[in-house]
Every structure is written in C-alpha cells, then in structure tokens.
Amino acid sequence: MASSVDYSLYLVTDSTPAILGDRDLVEVVEAALAGGVTLVQYRDKVSDTAVLVSTARRLHLVTRKYNVPLLINDRVDVALAVGCEGVHIGQDDLDLRSARKLLGEKAIIGVTVSTVEEARLACKDGADYLGIGTMFATATKTNTKNVIGTAGTKEILRAISEDGRNVRAVSIGGINASTVQRVLYQSSDSKKKLDGVAVVSAIVAAKDPKRAAEDLMKLIKSPPPFA
Ligand code: TZP
Ligand code: MG
C-alpha cells in the first residue's frame, strides 16, 4: 500500500466552526472524494477520544468506498482502533519508530518537517512521506514553527533526494487555487519534485467542496502558465 499511494491532492480535515461551519464533516469529505481527493487525513484537535474514534469509523466507510487511504493526525491509538491505513505525526507526537512498531510495516506514516535536519531524520527512521511546511502563513494553523516558502521547501527536497529512499513529499500551508501551481513548480528541485499538496481550508471551508477539489486537481494536472 505505502508505495502506491497517490499524494496529488491530500485533504486534511478541520472540525472547528471557523472552517467546517455547521456542516457534517463526513459529508464534506465525501464531496471532496467525489471531486477527486486522493488521500485523507482526519485532523481534529477539538473532539474527545470517543468522538474521534466514531468519526474516524464513519470517515473510513466513506474513504474505502473511494479506495482512498485514511490517515489519523497525531493519534496512533485511534488509527489502531479504527483499522485505517496510517497516521500523520508531528515533531511533538509519538516518535516515528514507536508508531511504526505499533502500526506495522504496511501502515502509511507521514511526518511534519520544516527543516533539512527533521527531514533527514524522518527519512532515516522510515517515514513513507513528509508533510513539508509551513509553505505560507495560514489562519488554519497559527502555531507553526516556520514559514519556509518555496525556497525552504526546495532545500528540503534537495536534501531528501540525496537520501536514496525515494520518500514521498507534500507541501502544506496556505495552498489554494491561487497558489497551488506556484507551490508545485517553484519548489521543485531538479532531482526531487513534490508528489502533491495538502490542503485544509481550500476544500473544507469551500462552499462546494466537490467543485473545490475538482478545480484544484485540474490545476495540479495542468502545466503552469508561467513554466
Ligand atoms: N500544518 C502546517 S500548516 C497546516 C497544517 C496542518 C494547516 C494548513 O491549512 P490551510 O487551510 O490549507 O492553509
Ligand atoms: Mg501533531
């Protein structure tokens, strides 16, 4: 599973009223899947464990219908309880080696990195992919360590291309229809390109999440006007 994952358009969820509004998260995710999202991370910083598990189970029913992997942010225990495809962990969460021991070799495990050192370590410890960011400052997550832009992202991509393991890479932070092509093409190193982009508000806060996903996917698949 881990090597065949399509990272092109990675939806990361948010359950706060500021972004989700009063809509049902599972319905929003299903619409985004219908619009072409290729990977889903359930990221919920507000619900208790019981709600996390029950929502993750509902999400998993939907993602399986679309044959798209479901990852859980932070919580290896929730991923284990639900039996979904993996987790995404930050620098302050359970360490990657422990997560791998608990979830097994087949699980998809991604790590947030914002420096070359963090990226090298995540590669060494066996990450399947890196969530590189924060690309641009964003209201969705204000406590990010670094805003690294396309230049910082390119530096990390160059470093991981030397690692030889072909770890996959996505960019996150402030990515939307206006920025996605710049992100993809200005960050690319000659030896290693981004495998995709991760977005929260561009889809979850959109009036029409299906349409938002379709529009982003079109931009991802088409060459930029400034190439
Ligand atoms: N990690 C770094 S930025 C971010 C996360 C989870 C939030 C990105 O949200 P948005 O709305 O796509 O800018
Ligand atoms: Mg985390």
Image (cartoon, helix red, strand yellow):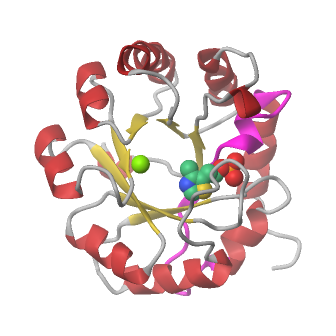
Residue 203 pos. (x, y %): 73, 38
The one of 189 and 117 positioned closer to us in this rendering: 117
Residue extending furthest toward the left: 101
| Residue 149 visible to the viewer | yes
Q: Could you say which quadrant of the image residue 31 lies in?
A: top right
The vertical placement of 75 against 183, above or below, is above
Residue 199 pos. (x, y %): 65, 48
Give the residue displayed 47% in from the left and 86% down from the top: 158
- As for residue 194 lying within the magenta part, the answer is yes
Residue 155 pos. (x, y %): 52, 86
| Residue 8 visible to the viewer | no
Residue 93 pos. (x, y %): 31, 51
Q: Is residue 88 left or right of residue 152?
A: left
The quadrant of the rendering that contains the C terminus is bottom right
The quadrant of the rendering that contains the N terminus is top left
The vertical placement of 220 against 101, above or below, is below
Q: Could you say which quadrant of the image residue 18 lies in?
A: top right
Q: Is residue 138 left or right of residue 143?
A: right
Give the residue displayed 32% in from the left and 36% down from the top: 75
The vertical placement of 76 against 82, above or below, is below
Give the residue displayed 41% in from the left and 12% down from the top: 54
Where does the magenta region start and end? 187-210
- As for residue 82 lying within the magenta part, the answer is no
Q: Is residue 119 left or right of residue 143?
A: left
Give the residue displayed 66% in from the left and 76% down from the top: 149
Q: Is residue 91 left or right of residue 106?
A: right
The one of 86 and 20 positioned closer to us in this rendering: 20
